[in-house]
Image (cartoon, rainbow, N blue to C red):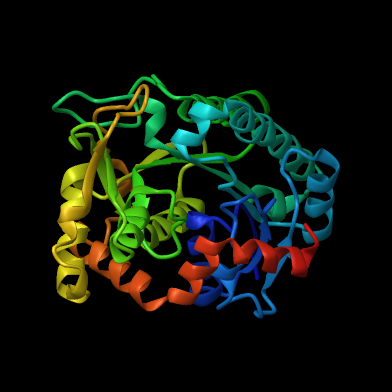
Amino acid sequence: MKTILVTGGAGFIGSAVVRQFINDTDSRVVNVDKLTYAGNLQSLASVASSPRYAFEQVDICEAAEVARVFREHQPDAVMHLAAESHVDRSITGPAAFIQTNIVGTCVLLEAARTYWNSLDGDKKAGFRFHHISTDEVYGSLGDSGFFTEQTRYEPNSPYSASKASSDHLVRAWHHTYGFPVVTTNCSNNYGPYHFPEKLIPLMILNACNGKPLPIYGKGDNIRDWLYVDDHARALRLVLEKGKLGETYNIGGWNEKTNLEVVDAICAILDELRPQGAPHASLKTYVQDRPGHDKRYAIDASKIERDLGWKPQETFETGLRKTVEWYLSNDDWVQGVSSGEYQNWIQNQYGS
């Protein structure tokens, strides 16, 4: 039985990865999470009682605690998803992003490298460090073209700059020390359990509550959307079969303007919750955020060609599943919206 250490496992993408490992494999999972505002252990309630699941409330910037986790759990691989991730928050408070995304990644790399150097034989040969990053490190595209693994880094926000820095650290640890790494850069994720500061869950919940649907600028910024469970499957595949030292871009082949996304959500809600229709009447255009990248689009040909992955969900099927999930999981939604999930965490873990 392999032991997978997942940092940020209580976050949106991390919790999807943990749930898949527990539900679909015989692996043991160690979830290492600081439990910031976006870390929600209630997203893992369905697997928390599994004997193959363990939780460590640890800040990846705390070197001694991170080293202890490696000594005690003896992982066969690391999937590094812990990060501050909301662009708007990085604009108003960049220091936290520098600390977690850059310093924390450095601390984790050193702890993992020290641990890896202590291993022998097959255990050492089979060890992997999978760094999960974002397409935002590449900057902004024009009207045509796609991000590829060879695209030059041009980060435009404090968030994307911090993630670009962490990508470079991982690359350097591989080339300098021979440390066994793989890196993935993904497009915008969406799906169940998404913290409601992000576009899709924010629009769903605001529309359900008759609140304005704030759209930056003209709503013409374009993103490539990837259903979170498709992403989690891709991450597991790269961990298992990805070539060491390589980067794989993971995208959904689903380019949509923000306005198209909001209109699609409203149309589904008009059908499923007609008492609030037409939900599109709630659309409100607000001042664009500073440095707002115009367009992201990922060329995911490499991971399809080399590893055989492609998304199972279209944007239409994934978005419908997402809206239906939020409508059917009011307890989770209310716990997050009210902040009650943080009280639950405090009672359980004293943080």
Does residue 276 appear to the left or right of 59 in the view shown?
left
Q: Percent from the top left, x then y, of residue 78?
A: 63, 50
Residue 295 location, x and y as percent? 24, 31
Q: Which residue is found at the position 30% from the left and 31% from the top?
A: 148
**Residue 308 visible to an observer of this rendering:** no
The relative height of residue 115 versus residue 77 in the rendered view (above or below) is: above
* Residue shown at 64% from the left, 75% from the top: 48
The x, y position of residue 155, in whole percent, is 42, 22
Q: Is residue 36 above or below residue 333?
A: above
Instruction: Indicate whether 205 appears above or below 172.
Output: below
Residue situated in front as seen by the camera: 26 or 258: 258
Relative placement, left or right, of 344 versus 221 is: right
**73 displayed left or right of 240:** right
The residue located at (27%, 58%) in the rendering is 311
Quadrant for the C terminus in the image: bottom right
Which quadrant would the N terminus be assigned to in this image? bottom right
Question: Where's residue 170, x and y in %?
Answer: 58, 31
Q: Could you say which is closer to the camera, residue 231 or residue 237? A: 231
Q: Is residue 313 visible?
A: yes
Most foreground residue, 20 or 305: 20
In which image quadrant can residue 53 be found?
bottom right
Which of the 4 image quarters holds residue 95? top right
